[in-house]
Image: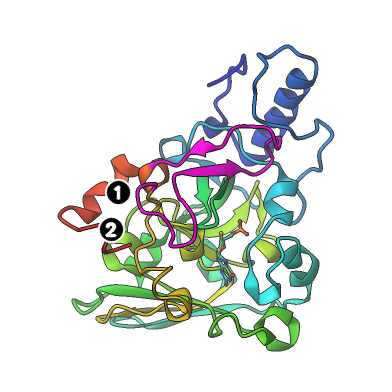
Amino acid sequence: MRGGNPIRPSEITPEAVWQSRRQWLRQVATGSLALGLPWGARADEAAPEGPPLAGRPNPALSVDEPPNAWSDITTYNNFYEFGTGKADPSLNAGRMRLEPWQVRIDGALRRPVTLDMDALLRLAPLEERVYRLRCVEAWSMVIPWTGYSLSHLIKYVEPTADARYVVFTTDLQAEAMPGVRDGILDWPYTEGLRMDEAMHPLTLLTFGVYGRRLPAQNGAPLRVVVPWKYGFKSAKSLVHIRLQAEAPVSSWMRAAPREYGFYANVNPDVPHPRWSQATERRIGQSLFAPRIPTLPFNGYAEQVAGLYQGMDLRRNF
Ligand code: MTE
């Protein structure tokens, strides 16, 4: 832990994370911490908003880095259904209908179900986990999410031996989503994981951020978060989860197969065809802050590299 804060961010609730972040910023402002700290945010920054959603902190699966401000996390977004500008999701996603919400889970499993939000929230104990999010566009954030491992839901539906891949489909509400008229992607937004990736404890079925229910722009009411992969794998506002034998073709793979592969593991050694992936810009830092070296698997190599043993990660990008 940098500075004099005795509490590790990973040991406390997101609400307390926010409080300690404020305190930390105040210390920065008064010069009581060493100079060179990256966080350029203001000590009077906005507090988290929305219905509370508590979860037990899981320090073992959290990174020990100060989280981004609530305002960074909720106003600098990618949610192309609402436009391609970073501010578009926070400006437009409020029009999305969030209730009632149901998720259909079917395919290669013994117990096909349609679950509402109450049932989903009750399925396993909620945890708070601070994850790095590395976008394919070479920026990153640190985000305190609330959710539980997707593996709980997958076990609940009793997969069969044919369940080798998981496909996620985002809701499509054309009248509320100005971005879907642009035709950048084939809507609805779909993504996929191999079964062992989906079952990995780090893969989070996510319902909240900073101890609050997810804001619409962050993928309300539920999304997946896969922290060792580029952010586009973390599909938002899920309505359908399908287990199947065949490898799926995601929206981004279909749109630009040379640029976006199925695996999309964060990899500083494999550049995007149009830019380097070796470094990243941490949102919220001053414009003069040096870029951060990107880590293999976004810093989660110890936990996940084993999933890809023997695979050529240049070809399987
Ligand atoms: N999910 C949907 N449905 N539509 C999207 O455009 N963008 C992805 C991912 N999930 C996207 C999506 C990308 S590129 C990133 S980086 C993350 O969401 C951003 O999540 P955040 O806005 O909560 O930080």
Q: Residue furthest left?
A: 310
Q: Which of 158 and 93 is in front in this view?
A: 93
Q: Identify the residue shown where x is 37% and y is 68%.
A: 261
Q: Quadrant of ligand 1?
A: bottom right
Q: Which of 265 and 147 is in front in this view?
A: 265
Horizontal side of residue 249 vs 218, given as left or right: left
Q: Identify the residue shown where x is 56% and y is 20%.
A: 2
Give, as a single range, the part of the protein colored magenta: 268-295
Could you classify mark 2 by the number of other residues whose Cα lies within 10 Å: few (under 14), some (14-19), or many (20 or more)? few
Horizontal side of residue 310 vs 173, given as left or right: left
Mark 2 or mark 1: which comes first in sequence?
1
Residue that badge 1 annotates: 304
Q: Residue furthest right?
A: 44
Q: Which of 176 and 263 is in front in this view?
A: 263
Q: Is the magenta stretch mostly helix, strand or loop?
A: loop
Residue that badge 2 annotates: 314
The answer to whether residue 223 is above or below residue 106 is above
The amino acid marked with disc number 2 is Arg
Q: In x, y percent, where is residue 291?
A: 56, 37
Q: Distance between the residues labelled 2 and 1?
A: 17 Å
Whether the residue under disc 2 has CB within 8 Å of ligand 1:
no
Q: In x, y percent, where is residue 71?
A: 75, 48
